[in-house]
Image (tube, grey):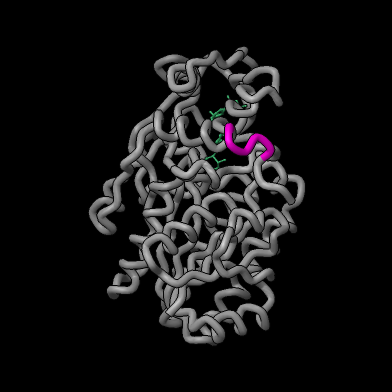
Amino acid sequence: MTILVTGGAGYIGSHTAHLLAELGRDVVVLDTLERGYRDAVGDLDLVIGDIADDRVVAKTCRKYDVDSVIHFAAYKAVGESVSQPLKYYKNNVSGTIALVETLIANGVNRIVFSSSAAVYGTPDSSPVNEDAPLRPQSPYAQSKADVEHFLRSCDATGLRSVCLRYFNAAGAHDSGDLGEDFSLTTNLVPVVMRVLFGSQARLDIFGDDYPTPDGTCVRDYVHVADLADAHVKALDYLATGGTSLVCNVGTGQGTSVRQLVEVTESVTSRSVPHAIGPRRAGDPASVYADPTLIRAVLGWRATRDLREIITSAYRWHQRHPDGFKR
Ligand code: UFG
């Protein structure tokens, strides 16, 4: 019995696929390699193909005797989703519907889905729990909410799902040989790393006049190794008969942009040149998780703090200044 990891050549997908392999589980990665990297898959089995290609998915299910799926494969750039909505709905939503149809036809009835706290938009307050209203503010976030909704409907087919709403994923593998591609992303930790490694002159802090303790935005940074572990626990929950579930994956701790810069300077003993710039449109002041549900139902909690996030990201960039090669 094998776990199919779609998007397993991407950032969170590759960490999860390797963790599963380290735990002795059989894994096969399905990835187009459009935005993922072959080197991130390493010596794991890799099928190059699209989730919407029913022949490739069906063949993979049969060949590997797939019994469960972790579905990461998706586009995830919020800004791009605004300018290219068709691309996002087609890949993230239509692609997932096609994938699920093929999975069901091949007797696969357990799926863990990579969702996002972006489905909450600007929450009324933090910590935010799973009952908060969904107010997606971009086609990307809407695509995640749509797939959650679709998967809930699929309960009627016998498919059981866990949707994991990630907060801010960051950090890298302990080995220093697996991490995030920081060339394209605009997320805070990769940007800070770009500044430290000289490919960006300084960090622009997007606003310091928010109603937060130091005026900069507060987020919930979760170590990618902890995130990977949440997927293993979600799979095990489904394998032991758990019913469909939607839960937050966050630490419950809010960290401001300024605090993150201070921790980075302390961990690396280097200064992070920065300047205060204007607010970024659409940024909520403060978003951090209420992780009560995932603790209670999956027995998961974050075990690594912000220092470990920064230490591991720094190690990855030191060892791989150009990231993975295409
Ligand atoms: N920030 C800066 N300067 C930068 C980049 C970011 O000040 O150059 C600030 C942002 O204003 C924000 C914080 O750092 O306050 C984090 O920003 P990110 O872009 O790293 O992350 P977001 O919280 O905007 O969004 C992330 C993911 C989404 C996901 C969401 C879930 O990018 O996909 O977390 O909470 F949905």
Q: How many marks?
A: 0
Q: Position of residue 13 (x, y in %)?
A: 53, 56
x 67%, y 73%: residue: 52
As for residue 42 lying within the magenta part, the answer is: no
Vertical arrangement, residue 213 with respect to residue 124, above or below: above
Magenta residues (range): 318-322
> In terms of image quadrants, where is residue 24?
bottom left
**Left or right: 198 as drawn, with respect to 298:** right
Q: Position of residue 46 (x, y in %)?
A: 61, 68
> In terms of image quadrants, where is residue 112?
bottom left
Vertical arrangement, residue 291 with respect to residue 3, above or below: above
x 41%, y 60%: residue: 22
Vertical arrangement, residue 313 with respect to residue 115, above or below: above
Q: Position of residue 69 (x, y in %)?
A: 48, 70
**Left or right: 75 as drawn, with respect to 257:** right
x 31%, y 67%: residue: 237
